[in-house]
Image (spheres, helix red, strand yellow):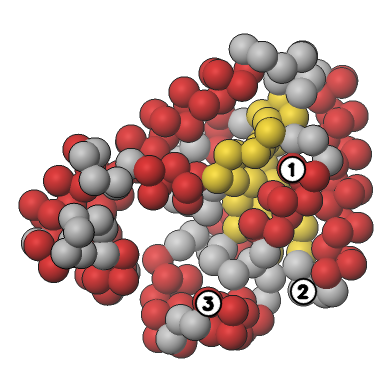
Amino acid sequence: MYLIGLTGGIGSGKSTVAARLAAHGCDVIDADAVAREVVEPGEPALAELAERFGAEVLNDDGTLNRPALAARAFTDDDARADLERITHPRVAARIAEWIATVAARVPQGHLIVVDHPLLVETGQQRRFDAVVVVTADAEQRVRRLIDERGLSEEDVRARIRAQATDEQRRAVATHVIDNDGTHAELDAAVDALYAELVEAARAG
């Protein structure tokens, strides 16, 4: 297998890149989806979050109230550190299980992509054969998130501040995709990237 870490700041278009790579036949795991799984009812992480942040981070049905948790975690450094301590090791362990499962059934050189917004923040970039970073102008990202997700500008900027900078991501990247253009330009860039990754996997 050839293991690829895909990352980028919130609103950069990383998920669009992941979908395009999946369309090319790559196996893709979404770390955000895994992060949601590890805090489902019955999971130890959810109980720990409720103990740390209080019952207000739970909905009436016992599920996680994500906006309430985000309001606490993205405005307080200590709270965010506790959130990461509770969730990040569990997310990493589950991703590792998924990679092992896929690796056991695919041929040598198959591309496996881990779509992980906090790849750099969690220091996991060293485990990958290639690290792809998607970047976009910060103000464009803010507009996208306000228009497409209905987030407030204050919330968006707080989330951006809580993540690594594009400079920090570029420092560990083997490939960078700048997503400041059109959808067609992004598709073309991803197609070219896929071809490069296939060649690298064959050479490796």
Location of the N terminus by quadrant is top right
Mark positioned earlier in the residue sequence (1 or 3): 1
Q: Position of residue 69 (x, y in %)?
A: 25, 65
Residue 5 found in image quarter: top right
Measuring from the top left, give residue 178's x and y in whole percent.
76, 64
Which of pointers 3 and 2 lies earlier in the amino acid sequence? 3
Please report contact status of discs 1 and 3: CB closer than 8 Å, yes or no: no
What residue is drawn where x is 63% and y is 17%?
103
Q: Is residue 62 above or below residue 182?
A: above
Residue at disc 2, secondary structure = loop
Mark 2 crowdedness (10 Å alpha carbons): few <14, some 14-19, many ≥20: some
Distance CA(mark 1)–CA(mark 3): 23 Å
* Picture disc at residue 149: 3
Q: Is residue 39 left or right of residue 4?
A: left
What is the three-letter code of the residue carrying label 2?
Answer: Asp
Q: Which mark is residue 22?
A: 1
> For the residue labelled by badge 3, is the local secondary structure a helix, a strand or a loop?
helix
What amino acid type is highlighted by mark number 3?
Answer: Arg
Could you tell me residue 160's position as x and y percent? Answer: 47, 71
First in residue order: circle 1 vs circle 2: 1
Residue located beneath label 2 in the image: 180
Determine the residue positioned at 33% across, 35% down. 90
Q: Residue at 47% of width from left, 50% of height from top?
A: 32
Image vertical order of residue 187 relative to residue 199, above or below: below
